[in-house]
Amino acid sequence: MSETSRSATFGGGCFWCTEAAMKELDGVASVTSGYAGGHVENPSYRQVCSGDTGHAEVVQVEYDPEVITYDELLEVFFATHDPTQLNRQGPDVGTQYRSIVLYHDDDQREQVEAYVEALDEEYDDDVVTEIEPLETFYRAEENHQDYFEKNPNDAYCQMHAAPKVEKVREKFQQKLKQA
C-alpha cells in the first residue's frame, strides 16, 4: 500500500459477493473478508452464522484515494446490494447479512451519512443501512478469502456473486482495473 492508502469497511450481505465486486476496482489494493459490528471477540464463521454474535459479514477495502475516492466506493457498494432489505440480501437472512457501513473517521461518517440521505430519495422503501464506527475488524478464516476467485463454479457464486461482478463491470467500466 502507498502512504496515501485508506481503509473502508462495508457489509452488504454475503462477504463473498461484496469482496468479488470490490476487487474489480482500480485503486483497490486489497479486500479482506471478515466480521465486525458485534460483541464477540474473534468470532468464527459458524458463530457469526448463528446470528448470536452481533457481527455482520463485512469486507475491509484498502484503497488509494488518489485513484478511487470513498464516494466512488460507496457508489459501487450501494449499487451491488439492496440497502432497503432489513437483515437480509437475497437468500441470506439474519442480522449477519445486514447492510452496514462501518466508518473509520469523521470524514467517512459525514460522507456516508450524506450519501445515504441522498440515496433514500431514490427508493420507495427506506434505506436501512446501518452507519456505525468501526471498533474492531476480525479477519475471516482463510477459506473465505478470495472465495469467488477460488470457486468460480460454486453454485452460490454463480447465482449471487457473478451477477454483482458483472454489474460492476458494466456500470463502472471507467473504474475497473486494467488487465
Image (cartoon, helix red, strand yellow):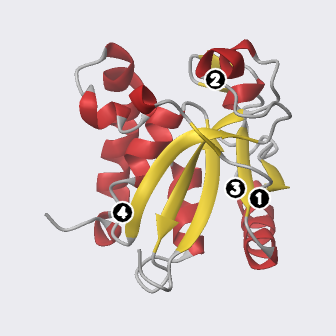
Write down the residue under mark 1.
Answer: 121
Between disc 2 and disc 1, whose residue precedes? Answer: 2
Write down the residue under mark 3.
Answer: 122
Q: Is residue 62 left or right of residue 86?
A: left
C-alpha separation, residue under disc 3 versus residue under disc 2: 36 Å
Write down the residue under mark 2.
Answer: 44
Could you classify mark 2 by the number of other residues whose Cα lies within 10 Å: few (under 14), some (14-19), or many (20 or more)? some
The three-letter code of the residue at mark 1 reads: Glu
Q: Position of residue 177 (x, y in %)?
A: 26, 66
Query: Considering the numbered disc 2 on the image, is that residue within a helix, a strand or a loop?
Result: loop
Could you classify mark 4 by the number of other residues whose Cα lies within 10 Å: few (under 14), some (14-19), or many (20 or more)? many
Between disc 3 and disc 4, whose residue precedes? Answer: 4
The three-letter code of the residue at mark 3 reads: Glu
Residue 45 can be seen, yes or no:
yes
Q: Which of marks 1 and 4 is in front?
A: 4
Could you classify mark 3 by the number of other residues whose Cα lies within 10 Å: few (under 14), some (14-19), or many (20 or more)? few
**Foreground pick, 141 / 67:** 141
Q: Would you say the residues marked 3 and 1 are in contact, meaning their CB atoms lie under 8 Å apart?
A: yes
- Is residue 10 positioned above or below 160 on the image? below
Residue at (52, 77) in percent of width and height: 69
- Is residue 125 positioned above or below 61 on the image? above
Between disc 1 and disc 4, whose residue precedes? Answer: 4
**Foreground pick, 78 / 21:** 21
The C terminus lies in quadrant: bottom left
Q: Where is residue 116 in the image (x, y as percent from the top left)?
A: 75, 60
**Foreground pick, 179 / 5:** 5
Q: Which of marks 4 and 2 is in front?
A: 2
Q: Which mark is residue 25?
A: 4
Query: Considering the numbered disc 3 on the image, is that residue within a helix, a strand or a loop?
Result: loop
- Is residue 145 positioned above or below 172 on the image? above
Q: Would you say the residues marked 2 and 1 are in contact, meaning their CB atoms lie under 8 Å apart?
A: no
